[in-house]
Image: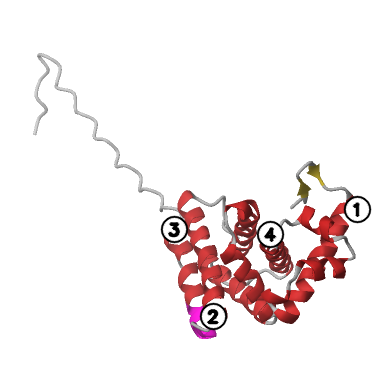
Amino acid sequence: MTATAADGPLTPRQVERRRGILRSATALAARGGYEAVQMREVAEGAQVALGTLYRYFPSKVHLLVAVMREQLERLREQVRRRPPTGPDPASRVAEALTAAFHALQREPRLAEAMVRALSFADRSVGSEVDEVAQATGAIVLAAARLPGPPTADQQAALRVVGHTWHATLLVWLSGRASLAEVRADLHTAARLLTLAGPAPAAPPAPAELQPVPPPAAGAAPAEG
């Protein structure tokens, strides 16, 4: 996804500066969670002025939601390099999301910071939240490897699966679900893809019986 600013696409130098800001925020969050991400410290770690940081990210919530989108892009790349091997879309999606969950589990403070930011996001962070949703959907779609373009029902199922993944991450971080429950929920949600599969082809209509024309006038009846 191309980074943009209010006045258009970023220059290569601006892209690198933005990456440095995201790296600084990620490192702080990984060490201390949401509270450890202070904008002044992020700016110092990225070696940019505080005013420059705010031009890229108006708030800590904007910043951490952008960090989450970047992490999801990395997870999508992992799915592309090592695609799940399940026999059907539902099992492949469950496998990929479980692997993504375990990847975030290895950095629980970073995961907590990102999820908290997402839960705090208001309308001002709408475009960033949409990017997170799109990145999650891209992971699910890449894992599913559907035989054709997703139907409307499959698109709805993909969205529900993505919502479930975010919800399970939240309840696990808050201590309200075990890893076994998370895996079970992900597998249950992924089965929606099977239920939303393309409708089976309708059987061919029976051939219509052609009416037998009446015998011509004056024709002799057929002998028995």
Q: Nearer the viewer, mark 4 or mark 1?
A: 4
- Looking at the rendered structure, the kind of residue marked 3 is Ala
Q: Which residue is mark 1?
A: 13
Question: Does residue 152 sit above or below 91 in this rendering?
Answer: above
Helix, strand or loop at label 3? It is: loop
Helix, strand, or loop for circle 4? helix
Tell me if residue 157 is in the magenta stretch: no
Tell me the CA gap for discs 1 and 2: 39 Å
Mark positioned earlier in the residue sequence (4 or 2)? 4
The residue drawn where x is 54% and y is 84% is: 179
Q: Amino acid at mark 2?
A: Ser
Please tell me whether residue 122 is drawn above or below residue 4 in the rendered image: below
Q: Which residue is mark 3?
A: 196
Q: Nearer the viewer, residue 124 or 191?
A: 124
Spatial CA span between label 4 and label 3: 35 Å
| Residue 163, x across and y down, in percent | 52, 64
Q: Whole-Å distance between the Cαs marked 1 and 3?
A: 45 Å
Report, in whole angstroms, how far the alpha carbon at label 4 lies from the one at label 1. 21 Å
Label 1, secondary structure: give it.
Answer: helix
Q: Amino acid at mark 1?
A: Arg
Q: Which residues are magenta?
A: 177-184
Q: Determine if residue 87 is in view.
A: no
Identify the residue under disc 4. Answer: 62
| Outermost top residue | 218
Q: Residues within 10 Å of mark 4 (few under 14, many from 20)?
A: many
